[in-house]
């Protein structure tokens, strides 16, 4: 994708996660099925924890939000048996990114015993716009263009 310059394709022999195309876009509140190949040789853990990480989080936070550095990565599911093959997670947008509308993310599986990790492809998480956001954009447009605002019922 052209938004995330850090999005690179993982070599097929190093992939653990499946159904994991690089640069996918998920909106806040969407579900993602995280699944892996139980026969993969790239990661040997029998049980593991799965995290979501926002690799660029601290770079993209405003100065006021730098205190949240310790909240990355975030646990999604613990003590997962390799043979379970997958689980569903609701994608959330990091609350500390108050001025941004998208952020790069990746899923990480960590072996509970050795600490070895394997990463998914990077994907984008997009903030959904609320009605108040749209009203502010409309008001700004009207003010910049000298147009009277219309009331919508």
Image: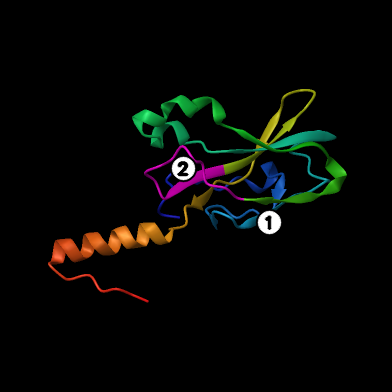
Q: CA distance from mark 1 to mark 2?
A: 19 Å
55 or 96: which is nearer to us?
A: 96
Q: Quadrant of the C terminus?
A: bottom left
Residue at position x 29%, y 73% from top? 151
- Looking at the rendered structure, which numbered label has been put on residue 147? none
Image side of residue 153 versus residue 70, left or right: left
Label 2: how many Cα within 10 Å (few below 14, some 14–19, many 20+): some
56 or 134: which is nearer to us?
A: 134
Residue at position x 40%, y 54% from top? 2
| Residue 35 in picture, x, y percent from top left | 74, 51
Image side of residue 39 versus residue 95, left or right: right
Can I make out residue 32 in this image?
Answer: yes
Q: Residue furthest bottom?
A: 153
Q: Residue furthest top?
A: 114
Residue at position x 78%, y 50% from top? 86
112 or 15: which is nearer to us?
A: 112
Per the picture, the main secondary structure of the magenta-coloured stretch is loop
Image side of residue 67 versus residue 107, left or right: left
**Dot 1 corresponds to which residue?**
19
Q: What secondary structure is found at the residue carrying circle 1?
A: loop
Magenta range: 91-105
Label 1: how many Cα within 10 Å (few below 14, some 14–19, many 20+): few
13 or 150: which is nearer to us?
A: 150
Task: Tell me if residue 114 is in the magenta stretch.
Answer: no
- Looking at the rendered structure, which numbered label has been put on residue 6? 2
| Sequence-first tag of 1 and 2 | 2
Q: Quadrant of the N terminus?
A: bottom left
């Amino acid at each position: 994708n052209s938004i995330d310059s850090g999005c690179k394709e993982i070599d097929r022999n190093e992939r653990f996660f499946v159904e994991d195309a690089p640069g996918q876009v998920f909106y806040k509140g969407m579900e993602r099925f995280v699944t892996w190949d139980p026969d993969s040789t790239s990661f040997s853990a029998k049980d593991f924890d799965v995290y979501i990480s926002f690799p660029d989080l601290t770079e993209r936070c405003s100065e006021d939000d730098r205190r949240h550095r310790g909240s990355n990565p975030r646990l999604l599911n613990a003590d997962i048996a390799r043979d379970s093959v997958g689980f569903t997670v609701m994608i959330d947008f990091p609350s500390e990114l108050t001025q941004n509308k998208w952020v790069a993310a990746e899923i990480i599986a960590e072996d509970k015993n050795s600490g070895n990790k394997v990463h998914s492809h990077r994907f984008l998480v997009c903030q959904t716009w609320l009605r108040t956001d749209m009203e502010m954009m409309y008001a700004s447009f009207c003010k910049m263009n000298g147009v009277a605002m219309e009331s919508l019922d």
